[in-house]
Image (cartoon, grey):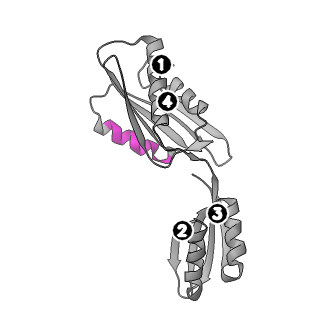
Amino acid sequence: MLTCRETFTNTLEVKQSKFIAYLLPYKEYEESLQKLKREHPKARHFVTAFRYINEYEQIVEGCSDDGEPKGTSGKPSLHVMQGNELVNVAVIIVRYFGGTKLGTGGLVRAYGDAVNEVICNSQLDTYLKTKKLEFSCTYDKLGLVEYNLARLNLTIVSKNFLALSINIVILGTKEQLSNVVSKLGRNIKISKVLESELN
């Protein structure tokens, strides 16, 4: 399965109609949709589709035709995402009507092509399930801890400086987190493994 970490865009023109497709992380979907509606006040449709993995590790999907004939835009967009095995992503296609009706077959093709093209022009990453690990270390061990976290390519989510120790939360795969524990075992005190994070 694949995912994306930033927003990518691509424009397709079909018979003077413009289809501006945005591929973005699902967590930015709602905010991005509102922003695009403000940026494109004269656009006719804002077609959407999304796929994400919920806390039960099930894929949740949805789509909207936003006023286009039923089944001609949201569903084809979602099918392209399914075919490319994308998760935790959304697509938003902003359509400017060019004056020529495309018909149902033309719309299905145009929306499918718009999503295909933005996917082809995007940088995709392999989807990895990650968890947060919370631990603490004393001030004299902080340099050693940060050095090892950097070597293991781990993301520090937060650092909380307390009177006698530093509370640190990191994000990584199961394998990365077990490497941290084996490398730093005696130098850190593990508080807890937090809920699964989905990247």
Q: Secondary structure at mark 1?
A: helix
Judge by depth and name the residue closer to the eye, 171 or 8: 8
Q: Secondary structure at mark 3?
A: strand
Residue identifier under label 2: 156
The residues tagged by marks 1 and 2 sit, at their Cα atoms, a distance apart of 44 Å
4 and 3 marks in contact (CB < 8 Å) = no
Query: How packed is label 4: few (under 14 Cα within 10 Å), some, or many (20 or more)?
Result: some
Q: Which of the marked residues, 1 or 3, is nearer the chain's N terminus? A: 1
Which residue is the extreme one toward the left? 42
Q: Which of the marked residues, 2 or 4, is nearer the chain's N terminus? A: 4
The residues tagged by marks 2 and 4 sit, at their Cα atoms, a distance apart of 34 Å
Give the mark toward the camera: 1 or 2: 1
Residue identifier under label 4: 116
**Image position, residue 31 (x, y; %):** 40, 45
The residues tagged by marks 2 and 3 sit, at their Cα atoms, a distance apart of 14 Å
Judge by depth and name the residue closer to the eye, 115 or 88: 115
Quarter where residue 19 is shown: top left
Q: Is residue 152 above or below residue 109?
A: below
Q: Which residues are magenta?
A: 27-37
Residue 194, which numbered label? 3
Q: Quadrant of the N terminus?
A: top right
Query: Amino acid type of disc 1?
Result: Arg
Query: How packed is label 3: few (under 14 Cα within 10 Å), some, or many (20 or more)?
Result: few
